[in-house]
Image (cartoon, rainbow, N blue to C red):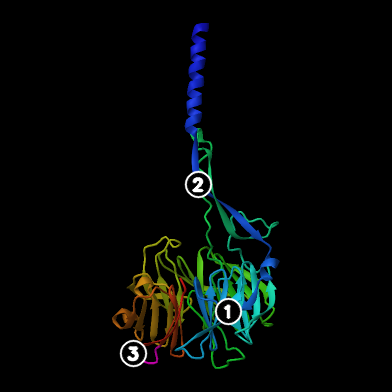
Amino acid sequence: MKKLLLPLCILLLTISGCKKDKCEQMMSYWKYSPRFMKIDDLVKQVKTGPATPLRNVGKIYLSGHFIFVNEVKQGIHVIDNSNPSAPQNVAFINIPGNIDMAVKDNILYADCYIALLSLNISNPSNPTLVSSVNDALPPLYSTYADPSQGIVVGYDSTRVTEKTNIGCGGQGGYPYMLEDKQTNGGVYTANTTPTASVPSSPNVGGSMARFAVNNNILYIVDQSTLRVFNITNASAPIASGSTQLGWNIETIFPYNNHLFIGTSIGMQIFNLNNPLSPQHDATFSHALSCDPVAVSGDYAYVTLHSGTTCNSTLNQLQVVNISNTTNPTLVATYDMYSPRGVGIDGHTLFICDGGQGLKVFDASDPSTVSSHALGTFSNIQSQDVIPFNKNLIMIGENGLYEYDYSDPQHITSLGYIPVSK
């Protein structure tokens, strides 16, 4: 019996060793470590300097004869648009973590990671910081956040090769790469009231909006929440409540005392009868897709596009009758290539259709839009537009473009500022 036990023990040890070897393997992967900074230190970096080239552009905003162009997570370019045929890049506002902006009464509101900044733009070529609400907004990066160290402003990557337990017997598992992703909680634009310096021109942003100003209230949406700020004192915003909206909230468009909020599954409509407490009127549902919105008269124009954050292959323009905001109804659906931003002025409809460029339609009859094309500006990777006073401002991957649409049948190209590669 003893003779049998010895070989059996050797056999068991051999099997055990083989199993251990199979469960542990050398693997290489990228390890991402969060990089922290205190918000006070970030706000101290906010300053205006000389103009810099456009590189990684985001949102656009028109205030009087100045255009503000977001440099993603870096700051804001200031463009003097006194002559739309020759716009001039005149200054750059360094704002760490900035994604977008809005304006009221010569005050520019901008995000700086979790801070909401107020900057005086009485001299738009030399904005100055007035105040900062340092805990107003959700973080751009939330994974592994450590409040004791500050906020996450990015990740440092290191290539690691090590022996790793791959999960035999249900234990352990493959190492994973922490993705360095920006949430949708920092993309904002607005559509507001005239500034004191240029009373004839309103402040207006594009359709990819997450800031909206209506009278003395600033509305901000992140991925799940509508936040309300009282800006009666424009230089000192006061947080005045919030409303949970669900998930995958994307854009906000203010129109006719209502907020039209785009989500990945539909358009939510809120009335502003009580401005500090918006009330839900209705939700117009659609298939899962990214969803900018623009509104004019009795109609909302909703572009649905495919993309990695939308998990959809749907590319459409949907026209929705919102004459009764408590009962929005679909009027028509049109297939598109990959539509992003959308804008409308009167009956002239502009659609940024991704790689197919800028498309223009006569929307006099919303039920037959696709049959009334006015033109296409191709070879432009278009992102968003601002139509105002017969001058169209468009931002794309390759630059800032301007067009004269005083005659919609013969739209002409005006000025252009290229993006430096």
Q: Distance between the residues labelled 1 and 2?
A: 41 Å
- Residue 344, position as x, y percentages in the image: 42, 83
Residue 301: image location, x then y, percent: 41, 77
**155 over 346 or under it: above or below:** above
Circle 2 residue: 29
Q: Nearer the viewer, residue 172 or 343?
A: 172
Q: Is residue 130 magenta-colored?
A: no
Circle 1: element type: strand
Q: Nearer the viewer, mark 1 or mark 2?
A: 2
Task: Tell me, yes or no, whether the two marked residues, 1 and 2, touch with CB atoms within 8 Å.
Answer: no
For mark 3, give the secondary structure: helix
**Image mark for residue 102:** 1
Marks 3 and 1 in Cβ contact (< 8 Å) = no
Q: Amino acid under label 3?
A: His
In terms of secondary structure, where does tag 2 sit? strand
- The quarter holding residue 257 reads bottom right
Q: Give the range drawn in magenta.
A: 404-409
Number of the front mark, 3 or 2: 2
Instruction: Judge by depth and name the residue closer to the eye, 57 or 306.
Output: 57
The disc label shown at residue 410, or none = 3
Q: Real-space Cα distance between discs 3 and 1? A: 32 Å
Residue pictured at 68% horizontal, 69% vertical:
134
How busy is the neighbourhood of tag 1: few (under 14 within 10 Å), some, or many (20 plus)?
A: many
Give above or below for 132 relative to 349: above
Instruction: Residue type at mark 2: give it.
Output: Tyr
From the top left corner, tell me how far across and down residue 325 is, in percent.
48, 78
Residue 1 visible:
no
